[in-house]
């Protein structure tokens, strides 16, 4: 009879399953970590170049065209398509803010990530499910309220679509009614008018 180190067979299998999952996750992380570090260094260089072009002078350079001075840096996290980049060093000028193409002001996600979140929400996932999907893919969990904030732009687009002007030069106009079940306090059926032009 095999020795399970004082554990039942079930506890022993569960313990080894946890160890196996830990090392599998560690292998994937071992590949991702150097990529994220390289991306952090690259983005840091891009930010330094953006600030140099904004100030018309590189670090420690004295030129007559200089438009301002550096004022240290701060750290922020950024969610990219490669995952979470923690502690990205962002240089700052003394007056105003840095003008960069990497991210918009007060945003913590790249546009591609925001579009992915909106597409996931449109596909039918709830705000919580969307946050869980983003966590699985990018390593950063977004709260349901953050997903709602990102999808709020969709409400504006729908409002604009509904308020757009319609042309009156239709050759054929088809009107039809579709019965749909409406939930609430009591389940009822209501007719929905559908118009095709």
Image: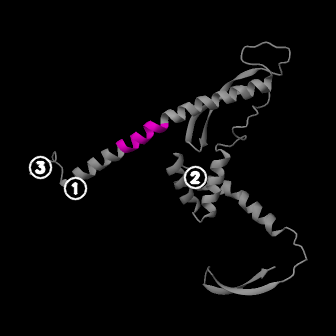
The answer for how far apart the CA atoms under marks 2 and 1 are is 36 Å
Mark 1 — residue? 10
Give residue 110's position: percent from left, percent from top. 65, 44
- Of 96 and 82, nearer the camera is 82
Q: What segment is highlighted magenta in the picture?
A: 23-32
Q: Would you call the spot at circle 2 few (<14 residues within 10 Å), some (14-19), or many (20 or more)? A: some
Q: Which of marks 2 and 1 is nearer the N terminus?
A: 1
Between residue 94 and residue 65, name the one nearer to us: 65
Q: Which of 101 and 127 is in front in this view?
A: 101
Which is more N-terminal, label 3 or label 1?
3
Magenta: main secondary structure equals: helix
The nearer-to-camera label among 1 and 3 is 3
Residue 54 counted in the magenta span: no
Query: What residue is disc 3 on?
Result: 2
Residue located beneath label 2 in the image: 143
Question: Residue at horizontal 66%, vertical 53%?
Answer: 115
165 versus 120 height, above or below? below
**Residue ID at (15%, 47%):** 6
Residue 136 rendering spot, x and y as whole percentages: 49, 51
Q: How many marks?
A: 3
Element marked by disc 1: helix
Compute the Cα span from label 3 to label 2: 47 Å
Disc number lying in front (3 or 2): 3
């Amino acid at each position: 009879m095999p020795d399970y180190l004082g554990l039942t067979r079930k506890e022993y299998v569960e313990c080894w399953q946890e160890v196996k999952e830990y090392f599998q996750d560690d292998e994937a992380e071992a590949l991702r970590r150097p990529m994220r570090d390289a991306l952090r260094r690259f983005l840091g260089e891009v930010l330094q170049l953006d600030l140099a072009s904004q100030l018309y002078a590189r670090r420690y350079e004295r030129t007559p065209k200089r438009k301002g001075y550096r004022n240290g840096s701060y750290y922020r996290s950024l969610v990219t398509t490669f995952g979470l980049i923690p502690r990205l060093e962002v240089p700052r000028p003394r007056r105003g803010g840095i003008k960069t193409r990497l991210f918009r002001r007060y945003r913590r996600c790249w546009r591609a990530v925001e579009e992915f979140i909106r597409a996931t929400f449109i596909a039918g996932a709830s705000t919580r499910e969307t946050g869980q999907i983003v966590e699985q893919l990018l390593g950063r969990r977004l709260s349901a309220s953050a997903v709602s904030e990102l999808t709020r732009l969709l409400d504006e687009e729908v409002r604009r679509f509904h308020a757009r002007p319609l042309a009156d030069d239709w050759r054929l106009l088809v009107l039809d009614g579709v019965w749909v079940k409406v939930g609430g306090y009591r389940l009822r059926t209501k007719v929905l008018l559908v118009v095709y032009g």
